[in-house]
Amino acid sequence: MEKFRFFPHNHCFIVLFFTSLSPLGLAQYEHWPYLPGYPEPPPQVYQPPPRPANVPKIQLRLAGQKRKHNEGRVEVFYSGEWGTVCDDDFSIHAAHVVCRELGYVEAVSWLPSSKYGKGEGKIWMDNVHCNGKETTLAACTSNGWGVTDCKHTEDVGVVCSEKRIPGFKFDSSLLNQIENMNIQVEDIRIRAILATYRKRVPVTEGYVEVKDEGTWKQICDKHWTMKNSRVVCGMFGFPSERKYNTNVYKMFASRRKQHYWAYSMDCSGSEAHISSCKLGNHLNVDAEKNATCENGMPAVVSCVPGRAFAPSSHSGFRKAFRQEQPLVRLKGGANTGEGRVEVLKNGEWGTVCDDNWNLQSASVVCRELGFGSAKEAITGARLGQGMGPIHLNEIDCTGFEKSVTDCKFNTESQGCNHEEDAAVRCNVPAMGFQNQLRLSGGRNPYEGRVEVLAEHNGTLKWGTVCSENWGTVEAMVVCRQLGLGFASHAFQETWYWHGDISADNVVMSGVKCSGTEMSLAHCRHDGADVSCPRGGGRFGAGVSCSETAPDLVLNAELVEQTAYLEDRPMFMLQCALEENCLASSAVNTSITSGYRRLLRFSSQIHNNGQSDFRPKNGRHAWVWHDCHRHYHSMEVFTHYDLLNLNGTKVAEGHKASFCLEDTECEADVQKQYECANFGEQGITVGCWDVYRHDIDCQWIDITDVPPGDYLFQVVINPNYEVAESDYSNNVMKCRSRYDGQRIWMYNCHIGGSFSEETEQKFDHFSGLTNNKVATR
C-alpha cells in the first residue's frame, strides 16, 4: 500500500472545491505580489450610468438596530440633513436601487414598519416608485421631498446582498457637507508582508488594504488607531488586536512606493464591520492627484487569534488544551462559530431572548468564545429551540464587555418563549481547510464521494477515504469543513457517484472523529500507514450535506412524573418476551404463577431542530411488530438502562425499537406522520412523539435488582443512525432510589443542561453513556 502524508495548507494549484466563505474571507489569501515583469490585471472600474441633470445629489446609509452589516433603515442625506423613507408603495425595485447606490450587487428583501427602529428628523420620501433601473433613489418618483403623511413607525429598511459591485467607486462629492459619513469600499483584506507571516495560516498580521475603484490601496497610518485595528481583526475572525514591531515595517515601507486610499478610517471599536465606521480625514494629494501620507506609512494590524485558531505546525493536529468552564456556549449550529446562544447561570444552562438582539451584543458573545465580531445576529430560534430556562432578555452591550454576562440585561423574560431564542453567526479565521477536501460525482454540490488532498513523494494528489466504520459523525466533520451545513447521510458505498478515476486510490483510512473537529485531518486516522481491505473506488466514503437538521430531546420532567412500578403476570408478557423486552432471567419465570417487576414511564420526544426527523431505512426495511400492531422504522431508537453509581449496568435494560409519528404538535404546526395503515414515519419540527407508560416494552425489567440508589438513563438515537444538529441533548438521566417496594425518580435532566461541576456531583463517575454490561 502506498504511503501518504497529509498536507493541510493551501497551495497555488487549482482544485475543485465548494465553499461558502464570503469573498471578504477569501480576500485574505490573495497572492502577494505579482512577479517582476508580470503586469497586474487591469482593475475593474464600475461606471454607473450618468445621473440626469435635474436629479439632486443625495447620499444613503443603512442605520438602526442591525443584525447584519448589509441591512438597516434607509436614511437619505438631502438639503443638508439626514432623513428617512416611508414604506408606503415601497417595492423590491426601490430596494435594488438603494442597495446598488450603496455598492451592493442587489437587494435581498425590504422590511416595512420601522423594523430597524424609528428614525429621527424628516421623512424625506413617501410613495416611492422605482422601476429598478434608476442610478439613484433620487431619480425615483415620490410625493416630493419632505411631502408625507407618514410617521417614523413606517420607516422602511432593506437587506442587501453581501456581494459588492466589482470596481465600485465611492461618490465623494457631498463629503464636505456631511458629518459622520459611513465607509463604502468594495472589499478589505489583511496582506501579510513579513516572510514569517506570509507562511502562516491564518494570516494574523500585515497591511490593511481596501479595494477602491477596483484597486487594492493601503491606508495611511497617521490617523490609525487601535480601535480601527480591533474592528478589522474582528472582521477576519480574531477576538482582539495587539501591538507590533513598527521599525521593521518602516524599513519595508521606505523601499517601495505605496498606493494610498484617499481617506482615513474612524472606528469607535465596537463596530462589527467597517461599513459601520465613519470616514475619517481626506488625505492630501500630490501633483499627479495621488493621495500622500507625509511622514507616515501603511497602516498595519496585528491580530490575536482565538486558541483554536492559533497558528501551529502543519501536522494537522493541534495541541490539546483544557478549556475552563465557559459562561456562554453555542449550540445547534452547522458551522464553526455559529449556533444558539446559551448562558450558564446558577449552574444551569439557559437561552437568551431575542428582544433587542443586535450585532453589537452578538459580537461580545463571539469574541468571548475566541472568534471575531459577529457576522449576523440571528433571531426567532432560526438555529433551533433550546430547552430549560430563558436566562437573559433585552441584552444591551457597549461592545467592549469581556462577557455577555457583563452587559446590561433584563432577567425577567415574561412574554418570551423558546421560539424567540437568539443565535449568532461569528466571523472565523480563513484557515483554508475547505481547499483540502472535495465532493466528487454527486448530483449537486451538497453530495458526493469524499476526496482529500494528500502529498505523495513530494507531489499533491487527490484520493479517497476508506469507508470502513465511516458514519454520521465523520460525515458531519466533512460537511462542516466544506461549509455545507450538517451531514444528512454517510455512505460506505459510492459506486453510483462517478468521481475522478485518477483519485480512486485510498489516501486516508481508520478515520474516527469526535464530531467537533474543524477538519477531517484533525480526526484520528491511520496517517501514512493506509489500511483499507475493500479498497477505494466504489467503496470510497461519501456524504450528503444539508443546511438544516432535526434535534430530538426527551421531556425529562414527564419521565419523573410518570415513573412507577408494576408487578405484571408472566402470562401477559409473552409478546414482550419474544421481542426481548425483558431481562434474560424471564425465560425461567413460570408463565402461570410468575411475574416480572417493571419500572414503567412515558417517553415524550420533541423535535426542536430545523428539519423533520426521518428514519434512515426506507419502507422496504421496516419491521412488523406484533405486540404493537404496527411497523417499526428504527430497530434501535432508544436505550433504556439502570446503572449503579459507579456506572455499571444493574438491569439489562433493552434497545427499544419505535414507530415514529407526530402524536401532538405546537398550535401552528400540522401533523405529517402517523404509524397507522403503513403510513409515513417521522417527527415534524415542532411536534413530539409520545410512547405512553402503558404500552408494551415501555419499561425496564428490574425483577433481579436489589434495593439501593441508582442512575436511570435513556439515550435517543444512540447509534447516530440519523443526523442531528446536537447529540449532547440525546441523553436523559435521573437519580433513583429503590427500597424493594417503591421507586423515587428525582433530578431528571437532559445531558448538558447543567454545568460540568454539577454534572460531576450528579454522576460520581465518568462514562454514563456507556451501554455495555460490565464483565465481572
Image: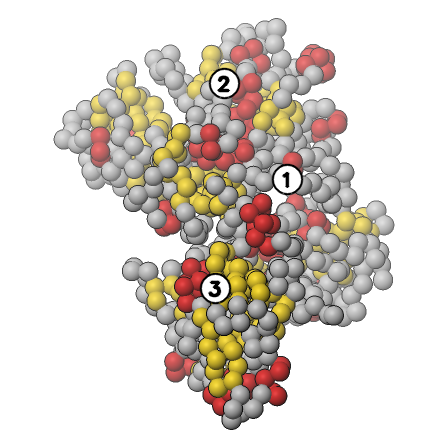
Residue sitting at x 48%, y 80%: 567
For marks 1 and 3, give the one nearer the viewer. Answer: 3
Q: Label 1: state its secondary structure.
A: loop
Query: Label for residue 744?
Result: 3
Q: Is residue 591 above or below residue 596?
A: below
Front one among 194 and 413: 413
Q: Residue 709, relative to residue 148: is it above or below? A: below
Q: Amino acid at mark 3?
A: Trp
Say whether residue 237 is visible.
Answer: no
Q: Nearer the viewer, residue 200 or 175?
A: 200
Q: Amino acid at mark 2?
A: Met
Location of residue 138 in the rendering, given as x and y in whole percent from the top left corner = 27, 28
- Using a 10 Å C-alpha cutoff, classify the residue at mark 2 as few (fewer than 14 neighbours), some (14 to 19) or many (20 or more): many
**Residue at far bottom of view:** 592
Whichever of labels 1 and 2 marks the residue nearer the N terminus, that label is 2
Viewer-nearest residue: 556 or 256: 556
- Residue named by callout 2: 265
Question: What amino acid does circle 1 point to?
Answer: Gln
